Amino acid sequence: MDFLDNLGIWIYFIIFFGKILEVTVSTIRMVLINRGERVKGTMVAFFDSILWLLITGTVLEGFQEDPLRMVVFAFAFAVGNYMGSWFEDKLAFGLSSVQVIVPEDPESVALADSLRKDNFAVTVIKGTGRNGNRDILLLHLKRKRIAEAVTLINTMLPGAVVVVNDSKIISGGYISRK
């Protein structure tokens, strides 16, 4: 990597931003694979490995003469982890299941109807809790729509218990393409 030897202070910027990019891409790769998107994850892995080799090679080649490269590398790794998790949260790959536990009354029926009007699939299950009968509303949706559903739930029934779980595979039923 002789072409990187004469960059002066710019080498630190290359290491810093390159490592942030590499760790962000690595985070996205892991999420894709964990959510069952193996082909996409494999394609991202190709670019992830090239970035890792370039950035790590740059640091290893000159770290004894210039230990600041290691510090920049480590700091960028930490920032890259944050950026990768933030970016993945914004992309919201995958599916989730939402459970809403509310008292069994006309308000819970109105909530289920309102969710359905907003194109959410809702299944209502009857249950019994400490303080009487409950309705358990089950929703399966794309992660991108979680905030929308939770906002609607909290607006209509502020005391509702809302539990959100990631779902790897959902087969059958109805999930809006919206």
Image: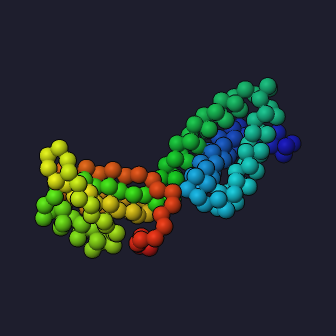
Where residue 144 appears, x then y in whole percent? Answer: 43, 61
The foreground one among 94 and 62 is 94
How many numbered marks does the figure carry?
A: 0
Position of residue 175 relative to residue 79, above or below, is: below
The foreground one among 124 and 48 is 124
The foreground one among 153 and 134 is 134
Query: Which of the 4 quarters of the picture holds residue 77?
Result: top right
Q: Residue placed at 19% from the left, 54% from the top? A: 134
Q: Kindly tell me whether residue 102 is visible in this rendering.
A: no
Q: Quadrant of the C terminus?
A: bottom left
Q: Residue placed at 46% from the left, 70% from the top? A: 172
Q: Quadrant of the N terminus?
A: top right
Position of residue 77 relative to residue 84, above or below, is: above
The foreground one among 66 and 102 is 102
Q: Kindly tell me whether residue 110 is visible in this rendering.
A: yes
Position of residue 34 relative to residue 11, above or below, is: below
Q: Residue placed at 27% from the left, 63% from the top? A: 124
